[in-house]
Image: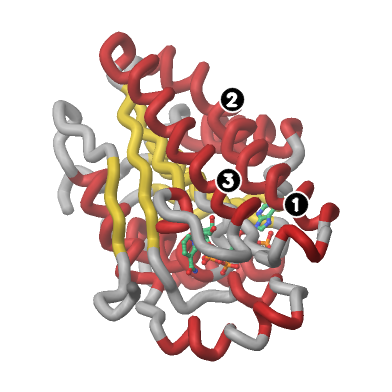
């Protein structure tokens, strides 16, 4: 993984799950990590762990629904390292429920975090990457961004949107500015994501869903692979499912 060495990588949603696993793996390959999430204590713990293992990490308490927070985050990377090579746009929530439960506040939150948060992070790094004439945006979508299933209408809509954003970014920014765009679509992964579900019907299915899951470092591996490819090669789309997931 020699092409990861020394790259400056921002990871949103780094305080748990896929983001945390990705941060550890990339730091292990010599990337300079800039970690973001709302839980500052978890970010500090992760940054300390990375540094103790000989890696480099800074962190910034960030709410991805705040444009200002994301501008501050990108500025931290530039002030510290002078550039942003990779954005792993990973922060997301999944309070799934059937539409007829009318959990409209949760619909709003999913749209704010999963779509607007992804766009705000892109807005914060794109001018920097264009100036550099290089960069790589990795958006974490989902299998739910490819196929719909009951209770995932809004979550799936946000993840279909993430794929649209990834492809739009590729078409607009890759040919002219050399900015790579990768869309990662995980299947069921063992993380804290299911803890945000409030619908009793869906909570009742959580144990079954968990029984299918693969570990977060499988997704981190896919992300590391995409980053490590040489600059002339852009991995645009990857789906990583547990083998037993239908
Ligand atoms: P986790 O719940 O473990 O991680 C979610 C991360 O997002 C946390 O670090 C959380 O940090 C962060 N986050 C949530 N809201 C915000 C916010 N407003 N601002 C900043 N950070 C926020 O779940 P996963 O690791 O599973 O999720 C990562 C991504 O993977 C998500 O986009 C999810 O949709 C996607 N995914 C996950 C799958 C799975 O089965 N686990 C399957 C398919 C896709 P904090 O609370 O500290 O802010």
Q: Which mark is residue 157?
A: 3
**3D distance between C-alphas at marks 1 and 3:** 10 Å
The secondary structure type at the circle numbered 2 is: helix
Mark earlier in primary sequence (2, 3): 2
Q: Residue at x 66, y 49 (%)?
A: 60
Mark linked to residue 155 = none
Q: Is residue 95 visible?
A: yes
In the image, 117: left or right of 156? right
Furthest residue toward top: 176
Mark 2, mark 3: which one is toward the viewer? 3
The residue labelled by disc 2 is: 123
Q: Residue at x 72, y 43 (%)?
A: 112
Which residue shows up at 30% across the image and 9% down it? 176
Tell me where residue 6 sits by quadrant. top left
Residue 143 sits in quarter: bottom left
Residue 17: percent from left, percent from top: 51, 70
Percent of width and height locating residue 230: 15, 35
Q: Is residue 2 left or right of residue 14?
A: left
Foreground: 81 or 222? 222
Who is closer to the viewer here, 237 or 31?
A: 237
* Dot 1 crowding, Cα within 10 Å, few <14, some 14–19, many 20+: some
Q: Secondary structure at mark 3?
A: helix
Image color mode: secondary structure
Q: Is residue 5 left or right of residue 16?
A: left
Q: How many marks?
A: 3
Residue in front for this viewpoint, 144 or 50:
144
Please give the name of the residue rendered at 70% of the width and 81% of the height, measured from the top-left corner: 201
Q: Is 178 rendered above or below residue 139? A: above
| Distance Cα–Cα, label 1 vs label 2 | 23 Å
């Amino acid at each position: 993984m020699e092409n990861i060495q020394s790259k400056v990588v921002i990871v949103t949603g780094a305080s748990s799950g896929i983001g945390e696993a990705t941060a550890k793996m990339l730091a292990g390959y010599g990337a300079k990590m800039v970690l973001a999430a709302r839980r500052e204590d978890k970010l500090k713990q992760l940054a300390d762990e990375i540094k103790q293992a000989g890696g480099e990490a800074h962190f910034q308490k960030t709410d991805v629904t705040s444009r200002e927070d994301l501008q501050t985050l990108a500025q931290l990377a530039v002030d510290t390292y002078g550039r942003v090579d990779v954005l792993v746009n990973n922060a997301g929530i999944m309070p799934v429920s059937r539409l007829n439960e009318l959990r409209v506040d949760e619909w709003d939150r999913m749209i704010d975090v999963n779509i607007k948060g992804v766009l705000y992070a892109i807005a914060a790094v794109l001018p920097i990457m264009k100036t550099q004439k290089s960069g790589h945006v990795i958006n974490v979508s989902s299998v739910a961004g490819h196929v719909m299933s009951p209770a995932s209408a809004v979550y799936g809509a946000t993840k279909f949107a993430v794929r649209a954003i990834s492809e739009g970014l590729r078409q607009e920014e890759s040919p002219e500015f050399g900015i790579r765009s990768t869309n990662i679509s995980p299947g069921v992964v063992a993380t804290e994501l299911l803890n945000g579900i409030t619908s009793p019907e869906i909570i009742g299915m959580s144990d079954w869903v968990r029984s299918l899951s693969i570990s977060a470092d499988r997704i981190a591996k896919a992300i590391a692979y995409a980053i490590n490819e040489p600059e002339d090669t852009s991995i645009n789309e990857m789906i990583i499912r547990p083998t037993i997931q239908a």
